[in-house]
Image (cartoon, helix red, strand yellow):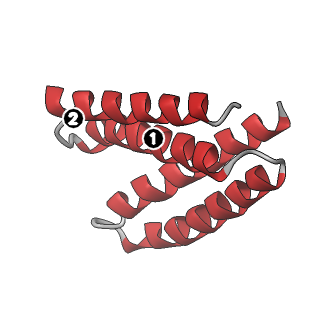
Amino acid sequence: MHKWMLLAAAIVTEVAATLSLRASQDHAAWLGVVVVGYAAAFALLTLVLRTGMPVGVAYGIWGASGTAATAVLAAVLFRDPFTWLIALGIGLIIGGVLFVELGSHS
């Protein structure tokens, strides 16, 4: 359970950093959150890997979840486009990560 909480924290901090990067387009003060958020996300991802989670699984879940959450939240917060093609792409990414997860078990 500990590794999943760490992975969730890594995802949340990466999404916050990415959304802050978008916010920094209008207000440069957000750049501090970007730097701290990405540093925290990678530090947390390192801790996840130290728990023994395979890198393909951890990075796949981190990347897919971060992509999906960022796309949805950017549409809500910044009115970025969210089309059916974007939703289909996110679904394909999540499906691919599920295959990686299932394939990692021997």
- Residue under numbered circle 1: 64
Q: Is residue 4 left or right of residue 27?
A: right
Image coords of residue 44 (percent x, y): 72, 56
At 21% across and 40% down in the image, what residue appears?
Answer: 79
Q: Quadrant of the C terminus?
A: top right
Say which amino acid is labelled 1. Ala
Q: Residue at x 69, y 31 (%)?
A: 105
Badge 1 element: helix
Q: CA distance from mark 2 to mark 1?
A: 13 Å
Q: Is residue 32 above or below residue 60?
A: below
Rate crowding at label 2 as few (under 14), some (14 to 19) or many (20 or more) other CA atoms within 10 Å.
some
Q: Is residue 44 left or right of residue 1?
A: left
For image coordinates 71% across by 63% down, the residue present is 43
Badge 1: how crowded within 10 Å, few (<14), some, or many (20+)?
A: many
Q: Is residue 11 above or below residue 47?
A: above
Q: Secondary structure at mark 2?
A: helix
Specify whether 88 is left or right of 63: left
Quickly name the residue at label 2: 86
